[in-house]
Amino acid sequence: MNLAYTRQQSAFREEVRSWLAAHVPTEALQSFDTEAGFTQHREWEATLNEGRWGMVTWPEELGGRSCDLIEWLIFEEEYYRAGAPARVNQNGIFLLGPTLMEYGSAEQKARILPKMATGEEVWAQGWSEPNAGSDMAAIRATARREGDTYIIDGQKTWSTRAVWADWTFGMFRTDPDSERHRGLTFILVPLNSPGITIRPIPQLNGLPGFAEIFFDRVEVPVSNRLGDEGAGWSVAMATAGFERGLMLRSPARFQQTARRLVELYRANPEVGDSDPAVKDAVLRAYLDAESYCLSTYQTACRLTQGGKIGAESSTNKIFWSELDQAMHATAMSILGARAELLPHAPDAMGVGNWLDGWLFSQSGPIYAGTNEIQRNIIAERMLGMPR
Amino acid sequence: MDFTFSEDQLLFQQTVRDFLVSEVTPQRIRASWETDSGRDPKLWDQLTEMGLVGMTAPETWGGLGLSELDFVLLARECGYVALPEPLVHTALVAVPMLGALGGELAQRWLPAIAAGEATVIVGLEQNLLLEDAHRADLLLIQRGDALYALNPEQCKLRHNESVDPSRKLYAVEICDSAEPISTGAPVQAFTTAALNRGALGCAAQALGLAQRMVDLSVQYTTDRNQFGKPIGSFQAVKHHMANIAVRLEYAGAPVARAAYSIANSEPGASRHVSHAKLVACEAASLAAKNCIQVHGAMGYTWEVDLHIYMKKAWALNNTWGDAGFHKNRVSSWIFSPDAKLGAGSTFPSGA
Ligand SMILES: Cc1cc2nc3c(=O)[nH]c(=O)nc-3n(C[C@H](O)[C@H](O)[C@H](O)COP(=O)(O)OP(=O)(O)OC[C@H]3O[C@@H](n4cnc5c(N)ncnc54)[C@H](O)[C@@H]3O)c2cc1C
């Protein structure tokens, strides 16, 4: 065990830091859940890619830097410290990208990855359906094979950023007689295909952060299939594995929130006198964010040395989502009567963006597999309890 | 950056775990409750033979010259079996503190400890009572800014019974004639170092205790049927257990980091230890709370083994600094102006 960075790692950090200092927009971008903001974020992805900072863990020939997980963590730390824009294409880069590298053909990789990297093609996920939420195996949207074409019918929902995204990836039932996990196929669909209707869904903050996607005889070539026909479930599980595992939420994000929370408390010390529990909650935020960072480094080191992530990765999703909720709840307590005010309200006085974070933190325990489902997985697969 | 334990360290952990699980059975622990000393000299001999007792002593003094980082995984295993013997105290507190004092004390006592011939116990004022003082051949006792090195004749011991029958606790009255071996600033340094080591030992054992309670409960809820099914198939029961698993999963790395920081005299060692003790003891307390619940009335009995581990977890929670003490150590730092917080601040040469 050696908990110091190597000279190379420190040099890498310096390089990231100075590039970000020169390139991160000085004025915050608009939310990517608005049309204008989406375009700004897409442009930012192109800028990142020009500096080869878009997908640092990708191989060099695909525009990445072949970074290992420790370098990725360092990159993320600098990224969040610099206050750089949120990643509009994260579903592509962090979820589909790694899945494509594992299951995609050479042709698919060459066709899809470069445009994903530049932000020219932004990706949305299409798993959930009105009657297939936690029970993803209940998927009913169909893809009927006719020669070299799949004809897709059905509906997906809650698809994040699908309002302005270019593509979606998801699972469709290719075998009409199949049930549950069998007979599903992983297919990539351009969202401008004839027969697609997208209906935006306003989220808690009023912005259309996700959408329903309706498919009416949508034709896609068979070459848009990822993995074998009928093998969609195992391909999808790889995506869910990456998502839950490490890359969805790096510790840097929560450590920055914890830091802002400490600063907020220090700026409002009178809260501690009226409610001593608040100080304890701030301390708790720091401790849990720090624990999350330490554990992530530990896992990352294990993985770079050839180890594997098992069912214990389900603890990760619960830990960060509950931490995020708790931190924002604490901020709301500190802000007191101002907490409910929108940032532009005339008397909000520097209330900041805590409210938006608070709203978003409510979704953490729901998306990417609800925390109840994660607890079931932990009990059954990590602890071995009976089904 | 390498946050992994070496293969040797993991192998040693496995060896010690196998040994402890087969030797330190609940039956043997219960038998020790029936004896006056509560201690098992044969077991101490076995631990000595394995090199565990003198593990952290320098080789020149009969030890293995290993570090806190080498021992921390073993301390977790001591927790897993709720080992009553003062092995964690010896290896993590007494031996290193004697080493730090050096001189004649170290020369006289370290080889004797490593040979299994003597026991040295360190007592801080903060702890109220001393563990295993009845077995001590030498007591290193801090009172205010004075440090005493006493043989048993120089003090009077008063036994206090603990909820955990394995814990042997003593109030120590120092004879008027005793002279301190040191006073002032060095004693403060001694106190902080000993406290950090004792707290690290608690944290590591708490991880093992929590794991043991989980293992016992998974087994119990798999075997016990109600409504025609194993109770472990009910979600409310599963989620009680999953909640422990989450807290336990994220307590391991802080404990490893605390051990590393002590072994490498990192400037943040004190707050790293406090962090570790807080989260590890919380995981063990949650384990105790949820595990007794999933046992039903069985969990409330003397007969079922769960309480062996539960009671030790409760006791460790408030010894070597209670939660309030450790929270204050961390919060006085995070609220200080020079604290570096946020992304990249976790490791020394980071941002
Ligand atoms: C912000 C946000 C973004 C999202 N983005 C996407 C996206 O991009 N693409 C996509 O496909 N989906 C997306 N989703 C959808 C998300 O994956 C689903 O919401 C989630 O899987 C839960 O499904 P559901 O909403 O139908 O809830 P339900 O499955 O109806 O669950 C409702 C409640 O019942 C509980 N429950 C259900 N089954 C069980 C069980 N077996 N045991 C215990 N409790 C159970 C759940 O835990 C939950 O508390 C997003 C959701 C949110 C909130």
Image (cartoon, coloured by chain):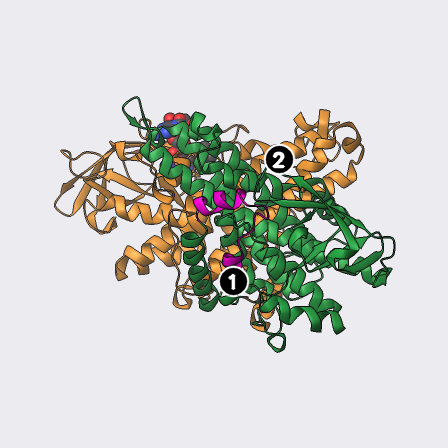
Quadrant of the rendered structure where residue B347 is? bottom right
Question: Does the magenta portion include B26?
Answer: yes
Residue assigned mark 2: A328
Q: Which hue belongs to chain B?
A: green
Which residue in the rendered view is the most extreme toward the top? B227
* Residue numbers of the magenta segment: B25-47
Residue at x 57% of width, y 40% of height? B165
Q: What residue type is labelled 1?
A: Asp
Residue at x 87% of width, y 53% of height? B176
Q: Can residue A86 be seen in this view?
A: no
Residue nearest the observer in this picture, A92 or A271: A271
Q: Which amino acid does label 2 sit on?
A: His
The x and y percentages for residue A344 are 68, 31
Q: The orange chain is which one?
A: A
- Above/below status of A359 relative to A109: above
The x and y percentages for residue B236 are 41, 27
Chain at tag 1: B
The x and y percentages for residue B228 are 27, 24
- Which quadrant of the rendered structure holds the N terminus of chain B? bottom right
Residue assigned mark 1: B45
Residue nearest the observer in this picture, A98 or B197: B197
Between the C-alphas of marks 2 and 1, the distance is 54 Å
Residue at x 53% of width, y 43% of height? B33
